[in-house]
Image: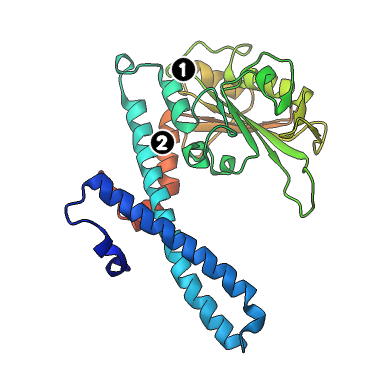
Amino acid sequence: MKYRNEFMSKIEPRASRPELEAALHRELFQREVKLKQEGSRIIREADRIPDYDEYQKRLTEFMSRYNELGVAALAQYVAHRKIIVELLEKAISRAPDQEKYPLERAVHHLIFPMRTTSDDLPYDQQNLWLVDERLTYHSFVASDMPLSSLSAVDNDSGKRPDLFAFDRRIAFSEGEQPISSITVVEFKRPQRDDYTPGDNPLSQSFGMIEKIRAGRFNDHRGRPISVVTAAIPAFCFVVADLTPSLKDVLVGMDAQLGPDGQGYFGFHRNYKIYYEVIDYNKLVRDAKKRNRIFFEKLNILGDR
């Protein structure tokens, strides 16, 4: 809006909504290209600018305009998060007969579409932040795919985690960095109440993590990537309703009840795995809390 006088004359007065959207996106793209070119020119000409004050002035003016684009992109991303949280809330509030597929699959698909990997899916379609913000910073993610089918993992296991991710240690050096952690996320059928010490989501997830640890990790060329330690640090998230039988299993595993009473967490010393069990209602509530300040700033906290 600040620059509307520069391009409004280019838009037909009777433009349809799609034509208006196309014109605005075209102007945004052209402004981004110009600013990137200007930034490159300022850097190239730095040694020819007569004094530091002049350089600082030009740089400040450039950053002021460039930051406006960043603010616009951030606003769009926050609005996207608000919509995803609303869709998640609607999904868990629907009756079973209103769903085309079970709730756990609906939630799974919102967080990361099934039968895909991070190589297939653009970053803005990945909503791993719903489970934990740290999952956003991953090197590879696979959703509902057998370990044996993944080129990133040389493993003949037929096990198929709902979500499997690994990350690499950040280092200021060239070449492939070693794998520093692996994460498994499992979604369980709501209201299930027949868990036993031998048949429960944590034991199943721990078994999958051990299978993953036993395999070999590859880069995009199929070359093996080293790991930080033989027992790679591992994290496990289980999203499930906290029914009585599941609570009994968790208490038997010495899991700790969270402060809000809607989740459990712990560290399994033998497997060396940190784990969290999150109730479906807690998943929505925590996502709202983490993003509340962003929604407030954009004035999109309430219903549209």
Mark 1 lies on a secondary structure that is: loop
Residue type at mark 1 is Arg
126 versus 296 height, above or below: above
Q: In the image, residue 212 lies at what x, y percent?
A: 72, 24
Q: Residue furthest left?
A: 14
The image shows residue 117 at horizontal and vertical percentages of 58, 29
The image's mark for residue 106 is none
Point out the image quarter for the C terminus: top left
Crowding at label 1, few (<14), some or many (≥20) Cα neighbours within 10 Å?
A: few
**Front-most of residues 101 and 205:** 101
Q: Quadrant of residue 152?
A: top right
- Label 2 Cα crowd, 10 Å radius (few <14 / some 14-19 / many 20+): some
| Residue 293 in sight | no
Of residue 110 and residue 181, the one placed in the foreground of this image is 110
On screen, 261 above or below 158? below
Q: Secondary structure at mark 2?
A: helix
Q: Quadrant of the N terminus?
A: bottom left
Q: Position of residue 29 (x, y in %)?
A: 43, 56
Q: Is residue 278 above or below residue 5?
A: above
Residue bearing mark 1: 189
At a point 26% along the width and 51% down the height, the residue shown is 20
Q: Residue visible at 63% across and 78% down?
A: 46
Q: What x and y, as percent, mark residue 187?
A: 51, 23
Q: Earlier in the sequence, mark 2 or mark 1?
A: 1
198 horizontally vs 224: left or right: left
C-alpha span from label 2 to label 1: 16 Å
| Rendered residue at 64%/35% (across/down) | 140
Tag 2 residue:
284
Count the numbered circles shown.
2
